[in-house]
Amino acid sequence: VIRVVLPAHLRTLAQVKGEVELEVFGAVTQRSILDALEARYPMLQGTIRDHVTQQRRPFVRFFACEQDYSLESPDAPLPEAVAKGAEPFLVVGAIAGG
Amino acid sequence: MSNVRVLVGTRKGAFILEADGKRQKWDISGPHFPGWEMYHIKGSPADPNRVYASQCSGWFGQLVQRSNDGGKTWEPVDNKFVYDGTPGTHKWYDGTPHPWEFKRVWHFEPSLTDPDTVYAGVEDAALFKTSDGGKSWQELAGMRGHGTGSGWQPGAGGLGLHTIILDPSNPKRIYIAISAAGAFRTDDAGATWKAINKGLRSEYIPDPDAEVGHCVHHVAMHPSRPGVLFMQKHWDVLRSDNAGDMWKVVNGNLPDDEGKRGFGFVVDVHAHEPETIYVVPIKSDSHHFPHQGKLRVFRSRTGGNEWEPLTKGLPQQDCYVNVLRDAMSVDSLDSCGVYFGTTGGQVYASPDGGDTWSAIAEHLPAVLSVEVQTLP
């Protein structure tokens, strides 16, 4: 089970509290996690990554195991701790705007 | 007795104000979608409980919310606005080509007859339509495909398609306006479009009376006279008596602003008097606050040229708020109510056509849009 932490606005939108737990089949990457997340919660489509380009929205970051994976390839494997559910995958709204 | 529902979009959420026909005691619900920019919220004329809301943020992009119960509960619907074909380029602020990129929905215009049909005006300027209640959106690409599109340039707020007017007498006729391209009209339900900017003069573009390039801020129409249009341009208030084919300036005695007149954002028409119109003059194209710190609505009962300031109940000193383009609306009770919202978070209402005003909400986030529904 993959654990995902969403920012507050997206938890409200998806009507979830706390962490989201997802089944991810195959390699655990940003893309496979987000595919599973959007399949479970279609209302999140377009809010984390662009509908068409599938690129991360500029003010959204991806953290895990105290590292920033935002600039890594969306198909790069994430740490084993994320894949095993020991650590969550964090979707974070950047500190910007007002 | 009829009720009135005021749908207010702000920088940090949506608010819904309701009152009975006396319009004296208002109940406020909200914030709905707190923390999100709510550019526009509008109900269907065919089913007033069907309401569409544009919700967006710099972090998470665009969402579309739909309510089937007058804004008590909401459900997110499709938020995928994809330009038809290869988007191409428009002009950037510095004149260089810039790719068309979807940013947000500025305005929803529900069909006059079908609650599931809605038009959406978006930034970068384009017109989208849903016919299934928001489950999917398709671009009416003929609008953006108007031959001048590559030369359109954004206004300070972006290249937004902000005004959509449906002609109640002709389902195939739609008017739209874009900052800063100008006004356009289709007579074939959106397949082809004609620029309708003759008579506009804008000294901030190289050819002041060019076919396109004018920063039209808003356009209003009375449903009983769909060929008569009133425009608030970057400078100048104008009217057209032939569906936009020709415009004439009707600034008249609006406040003098160092030799010019008629800067502002909103324009609207009285519900029962098609020659009675309202504007809120704003000082210059950079100050963006009322003249002399006095918040005044100007009313013309002659369709322009002769204006009277309406001040009773509005702050007449030290007031430096703005009133944005979609932030004025009217109800259709016997004594027409007029409503507007400010960037200072006030919503003012007049139950008597503008003679007297009071704040029906005072401390909201900056108001982006105000729409009014008159309910049976």
Image (tube, coloured by chain):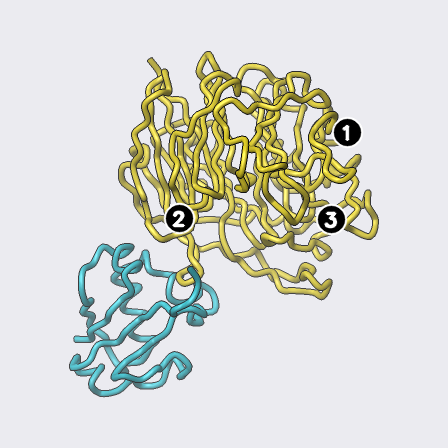
Chain colours: A cyan, B yellow
Task: Characterize the local packing of mark 3: few (<14), some (14-19) or many (20 or more) Cα atoms within 10 angstroms.
Answer: many
Is residue B225 rendered to the left or right of residue A92?
right
Q: Nearer the viewer, residue B41 or B304?
A: B304
**Image-quadrant location for residue B256:** top right
- Mark 2 lies on residue: B64
Instruction: Please determine whether, in this image, residue B158 is positioned above or below residue B268.
Output: below
Q: What's the distance in space between the residues labelled 3 and 1, CA to CA?
A: 17 Å
Q: Position of residue A91 (x, y in %)?
A: 31, 71
Q: Amino acid at mark 2?
A: Val
Task: Characterize the local packing of mark 2: few (<14), some (14-19) or many (20 or more) Cα atoms within 10 angstroms.
Answer: many
Instruction: Please determine whether, in this image, residue B99 is positioned above or below residue A62.
Output: above
Q: Secondary structure at mark 1?
A: strand
**Image-quadrant location for residue B306:** top right
> Mark 3 vs mark 2: which is more N-terminal?
2
The N terminus of chain B lies in quadrant = top left
- Mark 3 lies on residue: B213
Q: Secondary structure at mark 2?
A: strand
Pointer 2 chain: B
